[in-house]
Image (cartoon, rainbow, N blue to C red):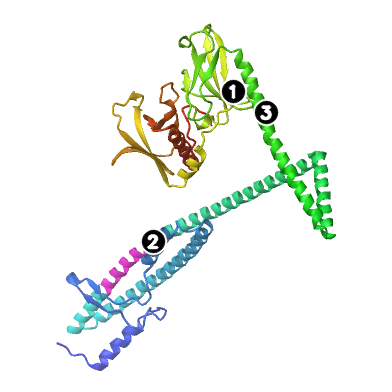
Amino acid sequence: MTKISPEIEEDVQAESLLSVSADVSFSSNCFPKYKLGPENQIVEESKEDSKGLSLKEVVEKETVQLSEQHKRLSVRDLASKFDKNLTAAAKLADEAKLRDVASLEGHVLLKKLRDALEALRGRMAGRTKEDVEKAISLVEALAVKLTQNEGELIQEKFEVKKLANFLKQASEDAKKLVNQEKSFACAEIESARAVVQRFGEALEEEEKNSPKSKTQDVERLVDEIQEARRIKRLHQPSKVMDMEHELLALRTQIREKSVLSLKIQKELAMNKRAEENKSCLYVFDGSEALGSHLRIRPRSDTAPSLSKCSIQWYRVSLDGSQKEIISGASKLAYAPEPLDVGRVLQADILSNGQKITVTSAGPIESAAGLGSYVETLLRKSSSEFNVVISQMNGQDYSSHSNHCFNVGKLRIKLCRGWITKSREIYHTSMQLCGVRGDGNAAAKSLFWQARKGLSYVLTFESEKERNAAIMIARKHALDCNIMLAGPDDRV
């Protein structure tokens, strides 16, 4: 084996170093540490990355953060976020370009280093030559590793470019949304201004068209107030008190006259209807109030038989301007319900093509004590009534056991002990009204359609409880924006 002297070794190292170009830039001051694995593969020793996360990890982290936060951001914040991420993606693309330059410099460096080692191998012999060949294999393995890293870098560049295009499109969409919302807001503001302007114009027109009598009354009241103030300033409390007593007496007289006027109007209407009914062949039999049971009966024996006539009941306003059909009320008798209070009941009888109209003498009156009873029940969260199921889905119910009819603020429940037969919240398909038949217990019964396909006829212990249950259920349903009435009723 030939021994190489130190002088020759220094010359060889000097020559090999001189063959490397001076325009190569190194990323660090020390050569990276590698070791050979199986089949002469280079295994890079693990070391902590002091530069932070890699490009791929940064992209994945930003994507996850956007996915988690996009639901909580407003349109304007989302547009700002997309702009920031677009800038970050552009910055990452610039860094990828710098890495391309560094990768190119690495290939140039490895090529020149391999050429230098090849030149050195031709001059060496023995063990030193083997070391040079080992170094050449390491350089070739480094070149392979660098090529693999370039492939990964190309993939990362593609993902960064894709993300940048996505963020750019999202930023444009967000800006469009901002402009659209802004235009919508401006349109709403203009609409509100137009509404306010129309209201102002309507008020001005109403003030211009107001009757002169109102202006004169206001001026007279102003004069009286000024006179009262003048009297007070002149320290004449006795005169002020006399005026106050006089005003109080006038108010009392006006109130009494108003009550008397309403009573006279009601009596006139009743007399008028009584005169009309005198010539009628039929008349109502029963008290015209809640809890009663009105029945049509013939006034004379010459009247046609009611069994051969068709009947329809109506509720009519006091002035006769509104007439509503009571669906299902086509029998000889009818039990008034809370909807009929303050209205006149009318029945049309058709016999041999001739229509005969029978009208109640006055409006239906409320039952005594019913209002205070309902107010007491409304203070509770729910009200319970003992009932018996008479019919279910139009068929007679065989069992006559007692059930509990619970009317709550949000739902109605029908149960027997622990067994619940029906429990429904207030909804548009629910119906509740008095029974519109001629049975003896019609004044104590109500019809309840819990839902489509399920209906009950419930009989209460008294007429008062039946009417109170109807009024409470309608009050709670109205609080839920639901109108409870009978089939085809117009409320």
Q: Give the CA distance from mark 1 to mark 2.
A: 79 Å
- Residue 15 lies, in percent from the top left, at 32, 85
In front of the other: 98 or 215: 215
Question: In the structure shown, which secondary structural element does the residue marked by tag 3 occupy?
Answer: helix
> Which residue in the protein does label 3 denote?
265
Which segment did they paint magenta?
139-155
Task: Tell me, yes or no, if residue 338 can be seen here.
Answer: yes
- Residue 490 lies, in percent from the top left, at 53, 29
Q: Please tell me the numbered disc located at residue 64.
A: 2
Instruction: Identify the amino acid type marked 3.
Output: Gln
Marks 1,3: beta carbons within 8 A: no
Instruction: Specify whether residue 140 is painted magenta.
Output: yes
Instruction: Identify the amino acid type marked 1.
Output: Ala
User: In percent of the image, x 26 and y 71: which residue is there?
Assistant: 141
> Which residue in the protein does label 1 denote?
361
Instruction: Identify the amino acid type marked 2.
Output: Val
Along the polypeptide, which appears first: circle 2 or circle 3? 2
